[in-house]
Image (cartoon, helix red, strand yellow):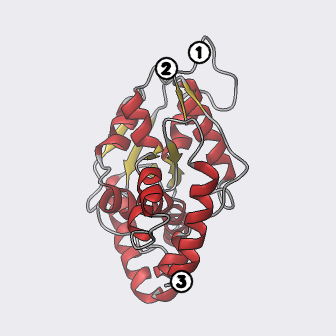
Amino acid sequence: MRAAFADTNAATARVLARNGIEVVVPREQTCCGALQAHAGAREDSRDLARRNIAWLESLDVDAFVVNAAGCGAHLKGYGWLLKDDPVWSKRASAFAARVRDASESLVEFGLVARPGTLRARVAYDDPCHLLHGQGIQEQPRELLRAVPGLELVPLEEADMCCGSAGTYNVTQPALSKALLERKIGHVLASGADILVTANPGCQMQLEAGVRAAGAHVSVVHLMDVLDRAYGGPQAPEGRSKPARKT
């Protein structure tokens, strides 16, 4: 996320802060290791997991919030990834128990600031790593429905893969393209002018599909939509003292 959509990271921090959550961004963190695991480099992924746990486990925070579904699913799986390591297994499970998707945290902690009006027809597409990997389906939709003026329209097969699938669009380009074209067909049929997702890999894949189809549909991360509704980077007014730290 930081490499491809740094602005989304900033938007996520603003949305969390507007809702009473103190955001801490530790310098001592590294890649979660998801792509290494997808490519079969399990030991490299385990090394990255150990580094992240060692750097982050002692932080006085309620949750480790992630806005990339693929990363979140992998971080939540650290306990399984290191299950056979007698030194790291319990530490990994304890760490994973504090990992939350940004939408999950916002719904769990509750919105304390009412979003502003955003008039748009929006379809939400479920990232596989969020829906199937983390069991998160309703929280993003609940947040979108909380935005005044926003019309959330149904998207057929929203729970089906867009073809990105970690490194699948690189290793299986033909099958990936077929899945993408099927997805974009449903997007166009929905009549939405904004397609919302919650994973950078999906976002890049869907943007490519929209461009290839010549469609006038914006592909936007959920946190960017909420940030727009809150007025973007301007300082929030009347925010209460942060109640949570992530």
**Residue 32 in sight from this viewpoint:** no
Compare residues 150 and 108 and report the one nearer the observer. 108
Q: Decide: marks 2, 1 in contact (CB < 8 A)? A: yes
Q: Which residue is mark 2?
A: 113
Of the numbered discs 2 and 1, the one sitting upstream in the chain is: 2
Query: Which of the numbered marks, if any, corresponds to residue 98?
Result: none
Residue shown at 49%/40% (left/top)? Answer: 63
The residue tagged with tag 3: helix, strand or loop?
loop
Q: Residues within 10 Å of mark 1 (few under 14, many from 20)?
A: few
Q: Give amino acid for label 1.
A: Arg
User: Is 179 or 43 nearer to us in this picture?
Assistant: 43
Q: Secondary structure at mark 2?
A: loop
- The residue where tag 3 is placed is 41
For badge 3, the amino acid type reads Ala
Label 3 crowding class (10 Å Cα cut-off): few <14, some 14-19, many 20+? few
Write the residue at 62% across / 33% down.
14
Query: Compared to 2, does 20 lie above or below?
Result: above
